[in-house]
Image: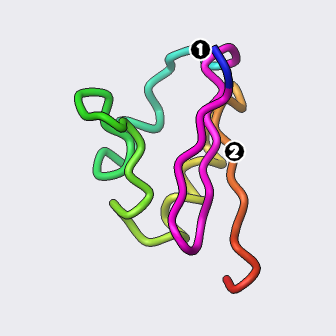
Amino acid sequence: MPKQKYENDNLTVFYDPKVCIHAGDCVRGLPSVFDIAKKPWINVDGAPTEKIVEQIKQCPSGALSYKLSKDV
């Protein structure tokens, strides 16, 4: 399965399902953004950019990564 990409004007979130260990830190840490019951399961508009970046940095496997737009 290829990397998935979710984006808004400020942020692009990348998810690599091949790397994910399903620890669930993202879902428990920021459920307004990471919700496996919804499609798409990552809502980059669900929290401020800073909070999303902070949560991505907690990903134990590195399956989540991000890129900020040039304006941020």
Q: Which colour scheme is used?
A: rainbow
The answer to which of 31 and 11 lies nearer the viewer is 11
Tell which residue pokes out farthest to the bottom in this image: 71
Does 71 sit above or below residue 37? below
* Three-letter amino acid code of the residue under disc 1: Ile
State how many labels appear. 2
Element on which disc 1 rests: loop
Residue 35's image quarter? Answer: top left
Question: Going by the image, does 18 lie left or right of 54?
Answer: right
Circles 2 and 1: CB distance less than 8 Å? no
Q: In this view, does 10 lie above or below 56?
A: below
Of residue 18 and residue 28, the one placed in the foreground of this image is: 18
Query: Can see residue 60?
Result: no
Mark 2 falls on what kind of element? strand
Residue 34 sits inside the magenta stretch: no
Choose top left, top right, bottom left or bottom right for residue 71. bottom right
- Rendered residue at 72%/32% (across/down): 62
Q: Quadrant of residue 20?
A: top right
The residue to which callout 1 is attached is 21
Q: Which amino acid does label 2 sit on?
A: Ser
Q: Residue at x 50, y 20 (%)?
A: 23
Classed neighbour count for the residue bearing mark 1: other residues with Cα under 10 Å, few (<14), some (14–19), many (≥20): few
Residue 7 painted magenta: yes
Q: Is residue 12 left or right of residue 41?
A: right
Q: Give the range drawn in magenta.
A: 3-19
Counting from the top left corner in percent of width and height, residue 28 is at: 35, 37
Q: How far apart are marks 2 and 1 (CA)?
A: 14 Å
Disc sitting over residue 65 in the figure = 2
The residue sitting at 60% across, 50% down in the picture is 13
